[in-house]
Image (cartoon, rainbow, N blue to C red):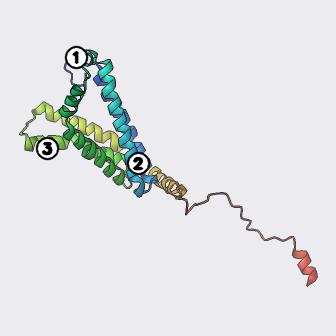
Amino acid sequence: MLESSGSPPNVGDLLNMLSAVFFGIHMLRTEHVSRITKKEKYFSLLGYEVTVIALFSASWYFLRGFFIDVEEVNSISWAWSTLWDIMISFPWIPALYTGIFSTGLCLLIEMSAMCDVSATETAIVYGLEPLWGAAFAWILLDERWDIIGWIGAAVILAGSLTVQIFGSPPEKSKKDGDSRRQLDRLNISDGSNDLSFSTVLVNSKKDTRNLPKKQDKL
């Protein structure tokens, strides 16, 4: 459906749409969490994120094998030699590169940058990803687009930039959000520097109940 190739809608189309929704949620939550988390705790937060990604990826791999590729799984003899061959043939170098650099390092840079950069500006940078991909394909692979390809790329890029620029909050709401984030940071205590925001009653009026007694003494 997304390529207009004439094929009916399938699961891949649904996954693409869901990925866009979760990408937006990820941007907004990363902006919020990165601004209320101390920088020395970024590696702990990164560990949680990578662990969740690894668990979901492994779960999908096994679920796909047992529910989708059932015939292929049943045809495999689960001997130790077969398992060893599967481990040897597994693409470890691309997997490690994807896990360490493309996932872990990029998430760490993203969290560090979003302390000062809004989710809208970050989404614009991500929106330029097809432009960089086309530029590298032009230089390294000598790929050339026809006029339809250039028009389609321009429409996609213009639509992404328009939604992200005009959909950004006004300056007043940004300032309010910054003040709320500063209060959130103050609420974070490390045990030794606990801050209390309990209400303190202050009476600015002078206590005049004892004035007659003082005047009598005089």
110 to 141, vertically: above or below:
below
Label 3's element? helix
Q: Nearer the viewer, residue 49 or 79?
A: 79
Q: Gap in Å between the C-alphas at discs 1 and 3?
A: 30 Å
Q: Which residue is painted at 7% across and 36% down in the image?
A: 144
User: Sequence-wise, which precedes: disc 1 or disc 2?
Assistant: 1
Q: Quadrant of the C terminus?
A: bottom right
133 to 69, vertically: above or below:
below
Q: Quadrant of the N terminus?
A: top left
Label 1's element? loop
Res. 39 image quadrant: bottom left
**For the residue carrying disc 3, how many other residues have a C-alpha within 10 Å: few (<14), some (14-19), or many (20+)?**
some
Image spot of residue 119 (x, y percent): 37, 46
Q: Which residue is mark 3?
A: 135
Tell how many labels. 3
Image spot of residue 36 (x, y percent): 46, 53
Q: Which residue is mark 1?
A: 7
Res. 78 image quadrant: top left
Label 2's element? helix
Horizontal side of residue 149 vs 214, given as left or right: left
109 to 212, vertically: above or below:
above
Q: Which residue is mark 2?
A: 45
Q: Which residue is painted at 8% across and 37% down in the image?
A: 143
**For the residue carrying disc 1, how many other residues have a C-alpha within 10 Å: few (<14), some (14-19), or many (20+)?**
few
Q: Gap in Å between the C-alphas at discs 1 and 2?
A: 41 Å
Q: Amino acid at mark 2?
A: Leu
Contact (CB < 8 A) between labels 1 and 3? Answer: no
Q: Amino acid at mark 3?
A: Ala
- Residue 191 visible, this angle: yes
